[in-house]
Image (cartoon, rainbow, N blue to C red):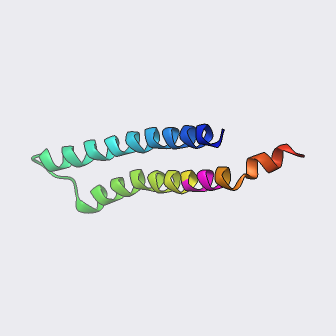
Amino acid sequence: MNGKKIGGAVLAGLFVILYYGILLGIILLSELSASEKMPLWLFLFIIFIFSVPLIGIIMALIMRVHEIKCGEEEEAKKY
């Protein structure tokens, strides 16, 4: 039973990570291929804005897998 819960959490997390990864790739590719480049500070700011959710998603995914493995959800069902 826990395998299905972990699999679902990991799958959902991977889809969102893939989505943000594709967005970051498109931004990076467009900047590298552009004849007129945007200012470096703006480029770094945009990359930062798209990277912050990735860090949060990875942290939430790790915490969710830990919760499932520790049985916190099963313990809560008792009450």
Front residue of 46 and 75: 75
Circle count: 0
Corner quadrant of residue 2: top right
The quadrant of the picture occupied by the N terminus is: top right
Percent position of residue 52, x then y: 45, 56
Residue at 51%, 38% in the rendered image: 12
Tell me where the magenta segment starts and ends, as one range. 62-66
Q: Which residue lies most toward the right here?
A: 79
Using the image, determine if residue 3 lies above or below residue 37. Answer: above
Q: Main secondary structure of the magenta part?
A: helix
Front residue of 48 and 56: 56
Taking 75 as reference, is 41 left or right? left
* Residue 63 on the magenta span: yes
Front residue of 6 and 27: 6
* Residue 64 on the magenta span: yes
Residue at 46%, 41% in the rendered image: 16
Q: Which residue lies most toward the left here?
A: 35
Percent position of residue 72, x then y: 74, 52
Taking 1 as reference, is 14 left or right? left
Corner quadrant of residue 23: top left
Taking 51 as reference, is 7 left or right? right
Residue at 75%, 47% in the rendered image: 73
Taking 26 as reference, is 3 left or right? right
Residue at 20%, 43% in the rendered image: 30
Front residue of 65 and 51: 65
Percent position of residue 67, x then y: 67, 53
Q: Which residue lies most toward the bottom here?
A: 41
